[in-house]
Structures are given as structure tokens and as C-alpha cells.
Image: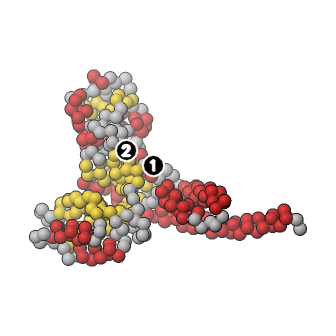
């Protein structure tokens, strides 16, 4: 037997073993896709891929082959992601608004293969996941210019869903009107209160009368159906295209770095991980002097950094509040468990509603 024939025999044997291992790997990928669907997790995670490739590349002893092995690993990941995308087709993602709303844009960016399902308001979108009609819901929790979305924070506090990821989406507001409209004809602008707030100076400068709508895409639809030249909507490029409107002016929001943070919520919490670096915690404190201060001290003393602490009325008792906290650190660690135990002395309700590796900008 020649050396060539021996080499081919080895390759055939290895290929047969690899075929079996490939099936095993793809069966595991199928399990990963099912988990991501259940917990509302995004397929793409570039930083995670880089870490896995780096770690696995170090297993190779032959330095000459390392770069080829990295390409092999990346190819495996690309095939795995393609399979996951196929498996997640038909996943239902709820959002508030109609097609063209910023939440719809966010849904398409985070879950490009899923079916984005519109709902008339935040509560209806949230409840569609609670009752099982959708796998997850995408809701805005904060805008970099106009602040918190209190209604969504209340849904998180009073509801049963878990936050399994936060995504930052840049928001670009445009002035939209029916074709043939000129700037001097516009007297009123209609949009979601958050959008009106983001464009407050622009509205004041032009002397427009602001009118509130359920969301930006609904506003665009109303303007398109009105046939009027004296009213314009504030909304996205996608809304303009969807409802056949023209952009009278672009980027009319006050700040160029206008970003909205969207939370993805599902019925099940993501499994605890030792790589989680951020968490969201909701709590109420005992009605005793200094309870809040002591609770905050406990968080810091255990090595956790509070990125945000916000209060909202519980609506159960007059002047009674709950606190929404976003922190840095692994809440699943021993220090995290110790902190939660110590908080019980000063808090009558503590709940971790989210724990994840990091916030993602899209």
C-alpha cells in the first residue's frame, strides 16, 4: 500500500468519525436554538464567539495549523447559526404598535427570522407572552434623552416575565407627511409622547401643535389616512415607507445620540451563568427609618455596583414605592447569594428579574 493510499484511509476514517461528531454537534445546536426560543435570546453573539474560538484554538498543539483550525471553528459556528436561524423561523415576538414602529424595527434587528406580532399597547404585548401566544416580547424601558418608560417598568414589577437581555437601538426621528405637503402647510405634529419629547425644541421652533398618539407608527398611519396637508407625524424611515409618506425633514430629534434601550422578556429566566455581569433587581423596603440606605449599603459592601436606582409608586398604598435597580456584577455568585440574604433584613420583597452577560448595542 502506497503512502497516498494510507493517507486516504486515514482521511476516510477521520471523516467518518467527524460525520458522527457533526450530527452530535448539530443535535446540541438544536437544543441551543430551543433554549434561545424559550428564553428570548438572540442568536448572534460576536464577542462570545471570539472567546470560544480563542479558547478552543489553544487546544491545538501544532502551531502551524492554528490559523486553519480557527477558520474551521468559525465555519462550524457559521453553520450552527444558519441552522439556528432555520429552526427559529416561526418564533413569535410581540411588540407594541403597528408595522414601522421603533419596537418593530428592534424586533427585526434582534430576531431577524422571527414573526414580529403587533399589539395595541404595552400591556397587550406583555400579556401575549404571559398567555403563551408569543415566545417573547420587546418593550422599551428607557430613552437616552426622554428618560424611563414607567408603564413598562410597572409591567415588569407587577408581572411574571423575566428580562433576558437589553439591547440599545439608535432612534432617528423624522418629520413625515403625505406627498405634496410643504413645510409651511404643517400646523400640527402627531406622535408618541416619548418622540414628542425627543423633538420638543424642534416642535417649539416651528410653532407646531403637538398631539399624542399610541406610538410613532400609528401616528404615521393616521397622517397617511387623513389626507391632510396641515398635519405631520414624527417617526421612522420604515414608517414612512410603510405608509407612503415623504420625509419633510430628517433627524429632527434634539440629540444625535438618541438611543432607546429595549428589554426582551420571556416566561422563563435564563439559566444562571458564571459569565453574567449585569442584573436587574426589584425590591421594596421595610417602612422603617434608614431601610433604603442600609439596603443600598449592603449592595455596595458585597462588591456590586449600582448603575441605576429608580423608584415607582406601588399603587397599593399611598406614598408606597418599589425600587428598580440595575447592577454590575455576577448575582449568581456566592457574594450575590450573600447579598440577597442580607437584603432580607431590610426589604420585604426582593426579586431578580434579569441576569445576563452584557447590554448589546445594535
- Pinpoint residue 303: horizontal percent, then vertical percent: 29, 68
User: Which secondary structure lies at badge 1?
Assistant: helix
Residue that numbered label 2 is attached to: 170
Q: Nearer the viewer, residue 7 or 264?
A: 7
Q: Quadrant of residue 244?
A: top left
Q: Nearer the viewer, residue 340 or 195?
A: 340
Query: At x 25% / y 33%, what residue is drawn?
Result: 202
For residue 133, say whether it is visible: no
The residue lying furthest to the front in this view is 63
The residue lying furthest to the left in this view is 289
For residue 232, say whether it is visible: yes
Cβ atoms under marks 2 and 1 closer than 8 Å: no
Label 1: few (<14), some (14–19) or many (≥20) C-alpha neighbours in 10 Å: some
- Pinpoint residue 13: horizontal percent, then vertical percent: 76, 69
Q: Quadrant of residue 335?
A: bottom left
- Side of 67 where 236 appears, left or right: left
Query: At x 15% / y 64%, what residue is drawn?
Result: 320
- Pinpoint residue 195: horizontal percent, then vertical percent: 29, 41
Query: At x 24% / y 54%, what residue is drawn?
Result: 150
User: Which secondary structure lies at badge 2?
Assistant: strand
Above or below residue 332? Residue 186 is: above
Residue that numbered label 1 is attached to: 109
Query: At x 58% / y 58%, what residue is drawn?
Result: 77
- Side of 301 where 221 appears, left or right: right
Quarter holding the N terminus is bottom right
- Pinpoint residue 240: horizontal percent, then vertical percent: 40, 35
CA distance for labels 2 and 1: 12 Å
Q: Which numbered disc, 2 or 1, marks the residue closer to the eye?
A: 2
- Side of 214 where 31 appears, left or right: right
Amino acid at each position: 500500500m502506497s503512502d497516498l493510499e494510507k493517507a486516504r484511509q486515514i482521511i476516510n476514517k477521520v471523516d467518518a468519525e467527524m460525520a458522527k461528531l457533526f450530527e452530535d454537534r448539530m443535535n446540541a445546536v438544536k437544543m441551543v436554538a430551543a433554549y434561545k426560543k424559550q428564553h428570548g435570546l438572540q442568536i448572534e453573539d460576536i464577542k462570545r464567539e471570539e472567546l470560544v474560538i480563542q479558547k478552543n484554538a489553544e487546544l491545538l498543539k501544532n502551531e502551524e495549523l492554528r490559523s486553519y483550525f480557527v477558520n474551521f471553528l468559525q465555519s462550524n459556528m457559521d453553520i450552527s447559526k444558519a441552522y439556528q436561524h432555520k429552526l427559529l423561523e416561526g418564533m413569535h415576538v410581540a411588540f407594541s404598535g403597528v408595522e414601522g414602529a421603533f419596537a418593530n424595527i428592534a424586533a427585526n434587528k434582534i430576531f431577524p427570522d422571527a414573526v414580529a406580532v403587533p399589539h395595541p399597547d404595552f400591556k397587550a404585548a406583555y400579556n401575549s407572552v404571559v398567555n403563551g401566544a408569543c415566545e417573547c416580547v420587546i418593550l422599551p424601558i428607557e430613552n437616552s434623552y426622554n428618560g424611563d418608560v414607567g408603564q413598562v417598568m410597572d409591567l415588569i414589577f407587577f408581572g411574571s416575565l423575566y428580562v433576558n437581555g437589553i439591547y440599545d437601538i439608535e432612534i432617528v426621528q423624522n418629520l413625515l407627511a403625505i406627498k405634496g405637503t410643504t413645510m409651511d402647510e404643517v400646523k400640527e405634529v402627531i406622535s408618541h409622547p416619548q418622540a414628542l419629547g425627543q423633538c420638543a425644541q424642534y416642535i417649539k421652533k416651528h410653532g407646531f401643535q403637538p398631539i399624542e398618539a399610541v406610538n410613532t407608527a400609528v401616528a404615521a398611519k393616521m397622517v397617511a389616512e387623513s389626507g391632510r396637508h396641515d398635519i405631520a407625524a414624527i417617526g421612522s424611515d420604515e414608517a414612512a415607507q410603510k405608509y407612503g409618506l415623504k420625509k419633510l425633514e430628517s433627524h429632527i430629534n434634539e440629540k444625535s445620540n438618541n438611543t432607546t434601550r429595549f428589554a426582551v422578556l420571556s416566561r422563563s429566566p435564563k439559566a444562571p451563568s458564571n459569565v453574567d455581569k449585569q442584573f436587574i433587581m426589584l425590591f421594596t423596603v421595610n417602612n422603617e427609618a434608614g431601610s433604603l440606605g442600609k439596603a443600598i449599603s449592603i449592595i455596595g459592601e458585597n462588591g456590586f455596583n449600582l448603575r441605576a436606582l429608580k423608584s415607582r409608586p406601588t399603587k397599593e398604598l399611598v406614598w408606597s414605592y418599589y425600587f428598580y435597580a440595575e447592577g454590575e456584577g455576577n448575582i449568581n455568585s456566592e457574594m450575590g447569594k450573600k447579598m440577597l440574604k442580607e437584603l432580607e433584613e431590610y426589604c420585604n420583597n426582593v426579586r431578580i428579574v434579569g441576569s445576563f452577560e452584557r447590554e448589546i448595542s445594535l
